[in-house]
Image (tube, rainbow, N blue to C red):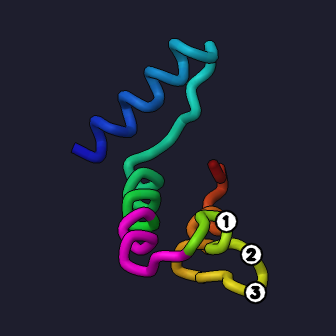
Amino acid sequence: MVEALAQNTNEYSFQERGTSVNTTAKEIEKMLGMYLKMGLVQMAGTRMYWETETRYSPVADVHATDSNPC
């Protein structure tokens, strides 16, 4: 299922932009994990996960460790 999601994401980006975002199943898994963690540790605003005073590393570090961040 995750592999199909990655493939469909790449195909959709190519159709819309003319270039593929070249995402992988591993990147999709990281994003799904990030969204699950955001559901468990809720904050008043989405940006709060990345702001200095309220930074939540299990969410904020998902983008920082990707070679191709969203």
Quarter of image, res 24: top left
Label 3 close to label 2 by CB (< 8 Å): yes
* Start-end of magenta stretch: 35-43
Q: Quadrant of the N terminus?
A: top left
Inspect the image, locate mark 2, and give the three-letter code of the amino acid beneath it. Answer: Glu
In percent of the image, x 46 and y 76: which residue is there? 42
**Whole-percent x, y for residue 22 in the image:** 54, 35
The relative height of residue 43 versus residue 8 in the rendered view (above or below) is below
What is the number of the mark on residue 47? 1
Inspect the image, locate mark 1, and give the three-letter code of the amino acid beneath it. Answer: Arg
In percent of the image, x 57 and y 72: which residue is there? 44
Inspect the image, locate mark 3, and give the three-letter code of the amino acid beneath it. Answer: Glu
Secondary structure of the magenta portion, mostly? helix
Q: Which residue has dot 3 on it?
A: 53
**Whole-percent x, y for residue 52 in the image:** 78, 82
Q: Is 36 or 68 nearer to us in this picture?
A: 36
